[in-house]
Amino acid sequence: MTDTSPESGALRRVLGPGTLALIFANGTIGAGIFAVPGLVAATLGSATALGYAVCAVLVMLIFLCFAEVGSRVHDSGGAYAYVETAFGPFAGFIAANLMWFGFAACSDAALADVLVSALATAAPILVQPVPRAVALIALFAFMAGVNIVGVKTGARLVVALTVLKLLPLLLLLVVGIPHINLSHIIPASMPSASTLGSGVLLLMFAFVGGEASLSASGELRNPSRTVPLGLLMGVATVVGLYFGLQLVAEGVLGADLPRQTVTPLAAAAEQLMGPWGRTMLLGAVSLSIFANVNGDLLVSPRCLYAAAKDGLLPAPLAKVHPRYDTPYVAILVFASVACALAVLGAFRSLAILGTSSVLLVDVAVCLAVLRLRQRGVQTADTPFVIPGGPLVPILGAAVCVWVLTNLSREELLGLSALVFFSGGLYLRVLRARQFKAARAARSV
């Protein structure tokens, strides 16, 4: 992939920095933030602010790297395109599988399972296997249809859902900040490095996800400006909101927060606003999950589309709809895989594989900054360059590796299996292409 200029006659460049920021915020602000405040409080105690500070620094390091590589490489595929351009098709193929299957499809399957389980509290019939499967199929079919109709239609739905799910959280902030008890948020002691690492790993479940927003890079207007501006706007929004919500939950619930490991924000809302506050936050959880899954269906199939264009996946995945100019085959395949995983269940395994997959890709993207600079890769536009030379990319990669070292042995084995399977699949595809070329040469 040497030509990083905008493609002609393929996908339309219609998305600006504001839309990219909202797609990023939608992809990041998911169901995790509704549960994580209680889980991290149970791990870090009253020192949760330190964990959030470390996560905020890590997220900024990672997305400064995404901003630079995104301003240098304008092709669709996001992290796949960046890693492929920097390190070649083998590394790019592994990154593509980690992003579309390891992260997006597994995470969407886990979230969709949670959504249907939440709906089952109001409609108990959804607990039964067949109605549950029908509901999941209907959910993915609807969102696939919306995103096939056009990237603008899908983006409008993402924007609308993002705004709707943010409103209850912003209301909780406005109502909760005046009721914060400062004695609840002052740390009594500092956690050890290993405890801090465990807390950061928990927090990263709430912070990861925005990487997929750049899979639609081929549909961004003026990517050299849109990518860094949209990402920095999105990161600032997410970090500010997360800090505020943790302070409200901790300041209102105090010592009770570590015991609220399922719906801590809903518990805080109930204490502040009564039963309707809890209902509002639980509704926001369902809306958030729906918005996340729809956002992934907007951007993640572009990984399949981009890999197919480069000949690494079956050619039909690169087909663009003749009327809507969207990669409709890739969207249908992605939705089908995610739906199948959701029907099969196994929420915890899917969620852990998704988080670790995206962190491994983040390591590659951080290192890609150094490689692309060395090779002088850029389009006709002036790229965004991170200040500080190699410091930020190296720090970003190092902190990601540190977080990954907190995975359990079983979790590391699962991630390794996906990487080795992807590598083996690439070699199989490569051999098949070489055999086909040799047979064609013999027939001449």
Image: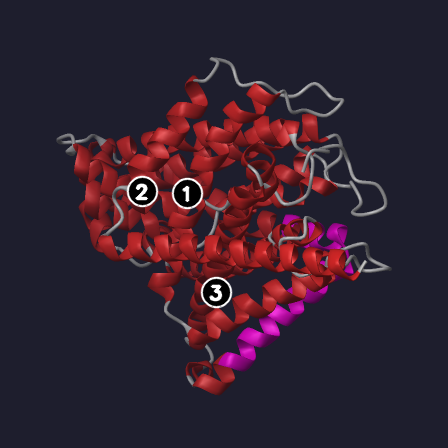
Q: Disc 1 marks which amino acid?
A: Leu
Q: Secondary structure at mark 2?
A: helix
At 39% from the left and 61% from the top, the residue drawn is: 350
Nearer-N-terminus badge (2/3): 3
Rounded to the nearest whole Å, what is the CA distance between mark 3 and mark 1?
A: 20 Å
Image coordinates of residue 143 in percent, x first then y, are 65, 64
- Dot 1 alpha-carbon crowd within 10 angstroms: few under 14, some 14 to 19, many 20 or more: some
Residues drawn in magenta:
133-159
Q: Which mark is residue 404?
A: 2
The image shows residue 40, relative to residue 422, as above or below, that is: above
Q: Which residue is mark 1?
A: 360
Q: Mark 2 near mark 3, Cβ–Cβ under 8 Å?
A: no
Rounded to the nearest whole Å, what is the CA distance between mark 1 and mark 2?
A: 8 Å
Image coordinates of residue 324 in percent, x first then y, are 82, 57
At 36% from the left and 53% from the top, the residue drawn is: 415
Q: Disc 2 marks which amino acid?
A: Leu
Single out the mark in the foreground, 3 or 1: 1
Please give left or right for residue 74 compared with residue 13 in the image.
left
At 65% from the left and 48% from the top, the residue drawn is: 159
Q: Which residue is mark 3?
A: 109
Q: Mark 1 near mark 2, Cβ–Cβ under 8 Å?
A: yes
